[in-house]
Amino acid sequence: MTSLVKDTEPEGRPEIRAVPVRHYGRWVAAALILYVAVWAVYSVAHNERFGWDVMGRYFTADAVLSGIGTTLGLTAIAMVMGVVGGVLLAVMRLSPNPLISGTSWLYIWAFRGTPVLVQILLWGFISALIPRFSIGIPFGPTFADFSANSVITPFVAGCLGLGLNEAAYMAEIVRAGILSVDPGQDEAACALGMSRTKSMRRIVLPQAMRVIIPPTGNETISMLKTSSLVSVIAVADLLYSVQIIYGRTYQTIPLLLLASAWYLVMTSVLTVGQFYLERYFGRGAARRQTMLERLWANLRTARPAGKGTR
């Protein structure tokens, strides 16, 4: 069946062409950035002082790979301690009990107000303050007695220093996430007969995750790099392992660049994981695009527009 609708536009009317806006400034800026990037890469690649052969020789050395494992272990343990302790401290901070709330505030004040390096050193030399630990009844019999050096090894001291400090920062992140949830949600849960603990676990925290996850991902990446501070108490992490090698070979700059390259690799992996985790907990809101998706969208919009219709 043919259409009976006729073209009512006057004959000879010129066609409308959709011409995209030209952004010449963007092309000039992109060309300058590309030139500088190529020049920088060429200069670095042809500078023998960087010692690329040394980096290649030690990049997968056993000591370096062992240090990477220690770094990842420190990061994981410290972040678990930080997240668990942060949630507990945040809930305590929001408690109506002034003693519980005050205790949380005092902890956060003390651990955020002193450098993490100082805290790591204090845990590393804890035996100077408390030579022995004992388990028993206060002012009564003792059931077990331990040397502080045998319990708090350098690795344990690093975990305690990093994890307890991170708990103070995570407490404020979690508290901000909890406060971002409408108080009516908690009131409705209490009206249905839920306890405060169950309401927090089943209603408030799941909604607060959208606010909590992004800064937690940043804290994890920061923790990976901050873990290098444990090298001051002789924990064989990535940086300490590299220091041992260049203390023997005197190839300081190439091996520091090697450590930086491995840190970049690990932080890049964590960044990708953070992106997908944020997109998962942010479902229902605006969908975040990956870099490839944004590139493809820009290429599609950059195509020349075809002829318009009459």
Image (tube, helix red, strand yellow):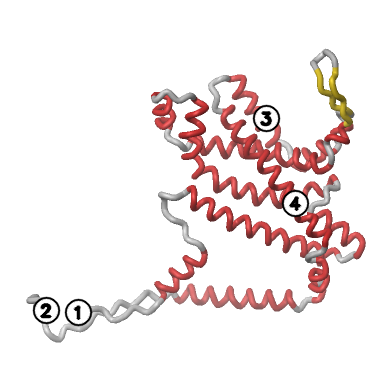
Instruction: Looking at this view, name the residue that lies furthest to the bottom.
Output: 12
Q: Is residue 247 above or below residue 145?
A: below
Residue 82: quarter of image? top right
Place of residue 114 in the rendered image (x, y in percent of width and height, measured from the top left): 73, 37
Q: Label 3 amino acid?
A: Tyr
The residue at the point 58 percent across, 58 percent down is: 272
In the picture, the disc for residue 107 is 3
N-terminal of the pair, mark 2 or mark 1, is: 2
Q: Which residue is mark 4?
A: 71
Q: Is residue 160 left or right of residue 214?
A: right
Query: Does 149 appear above or below 63?
Result: above
Query: Which image quadrant is residue 4 in?
Result: bottom left
Q: Which of the two discs, 3 and 1, labels the residue nearer the N terminus?
A: 3
- Residue 7: assigned label: 2
Q: Local crowd at mark 1 within 10 Å, few (<14), some, or many (≥20)?
A: few
Residue placed at 89% from the left, 31% from the top? 147
Q: Which residue is mark 1?
A: 310
Instruction: Name which of mark 4 and mark 3 comes first in the sequence.
Output: 4
Give 280 or 289, whichever is nearer the viewer: 280
Q: CA distance from mark 2 to mark 1?
A: 9 Å
**Mark positioned earlier in the residue sequence (4 or 1):** 4
Q: Residues within 10 Å of mark 3 (few under 14, many from 20)?
A: some
Q: CA distance from mark 2 to mark 4?
A: 73 Å
